[in-house]
Amino acid sequence: MTTPSLRSRVLLIDLLKAMAAQLIVLHHLAWFGPLSEQVVGLGYGSAEIIGWFANYGRYAVAVFIVTSGFLSAQFLPMRGLQPGDTPGCLIRERYFRLAMPFAVALLLAIICNLLARQWMSHDSLGSPPQLLQFLAHVLMLQGVLGVEALSAGVWYVAIDFQLYVLFVLLLWLGQSLTHLTRRPAGADFSGGALVLLVALASLFYFNLNARWDNTALYFFGAYAFGVGSGWAIRSEQRIRFLWLISIAGLLALWVDFRPRLAVSLLTALTLGCSRLHIPHWEVRLVHYLGGTSYALFLVHFPVYLIVSAVFQHFGLNTPALSVLGLGVTWMSSMLAAHSFHRRVELPLGRYRKHRMQCSSRQRK
């Protein structure tokens, strides 16, 4: 079997992220807000459709977890950190990559929440936003501290940061242990062994107990699927890596079948095995939707609150008009994501790379 090129897999990643982002948006539209509640009364199977997206759309977040691990593995090999890298610098770089657009999106969420309160009263608004609540989110500690979310799905941003921190620290610790034991150059696999051990602990213990679901330990097994798939395509032992991922994943599912974990395993194996061919005219659209997926993830719920408030205030809350409202929300979210990506995410990314890069090589 020919090893697929990284370029084809980047296209595949964008495709997976684009589809996952759309599913997450549809999940939140179905789960929150008065519009979806009204649509259920339309009939014609609307209740079943809304129920499906509300119950199953959330599993798409597993795609983001796996692709995040896969991309991190492209720049952090199993043998450890590269020369000139330090855990603190890598973690700082990752934090600002996530936190800078995240903070802007949180301010947008607060403003939209306060505006929507003027015209709408609904559980989806939550409690009035507070300063300490905002600071907990910016520090990626809202889940650990039990702080109410300022927007739907923002728990994932904190978890993604925690997963990367844990991954970097495991590689650094493995590399340090290798140096202490004076193993020969090129024989450094301690980091990979630690990643495997923590991944198995996650799959067979932490992920089975919901009280850990605000920590990286709960999700690290799925993240490690992506890491293993990313290391597989860079290794001559690719098939062994994929067999290891498959065996660990299937055993974990046999112990307790978890749909999100099944999606994670399937995504990792797809990245490790598949070569994707897409017609030339479609490539640009796939890259665009994948590239704006983070922006869409951040801004769609504030948009939903505003559209819901407008429809409720003007009495446009019939089942048929609520379907229109969901369509308006989706289109407005796509436009807002485009603007956020162009005006916020990309400029902040350029600033971060110019001012905060650990080294000259490009990172995820």
Image (cartoon, rainbow, N blue to C red):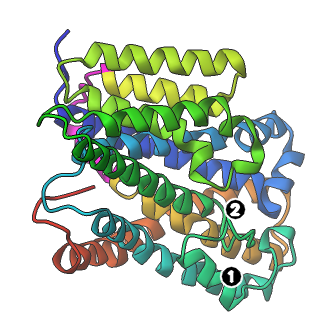
Instruction: Give me the disc on residue 325.
Output: 2
User: Is residue 280 shown in magenta?
Assistant: yes
The magenta stretch is 273-290
Q: Earlier in the sequence, mark 1 or mark 2?
A: 1
The foreground one among 160 and 82 is: 82
Q: Amino acid at mark 2?
A: Gly
The reply to whether residue 172 is visible in this rendering is yes
Pointer 2 local density, CA inside 10 Å: few below 14, some 14–19, many at least 20: many
Q: Position of residue 177 (x, y in %)?
A: 31, 45
The foreground one among 132 and 294 is: 132
Q: Main secondary structure of the magenta part?
A: helix
Residue 105 located left or right of residue 363: right
Relative to 265, is 11 above or below?
below
Q: Amino acid at mark 1?
A: Gln
Q: Position of residue 108 (x, y in %)?
A: 56, 81
Q: Position of residue 298 (x, y in %)?
A: 52, 66
The foreground one among 72 and 197 is: 197
The reply to whether residue 331 is visible in this rendering is no
Name the residue that disc number 1 marks: 133
User: Residue at 56% of width from left, 29% of height from top?
Assistant: 263
For this orientation, the residue located farthest to the front is 181
Pointer 1 local density, CA inside 10 Å: few below 14, some 14–19, many at least 20: some
User: Is residue 41 shown in magenta?
Assistant: no
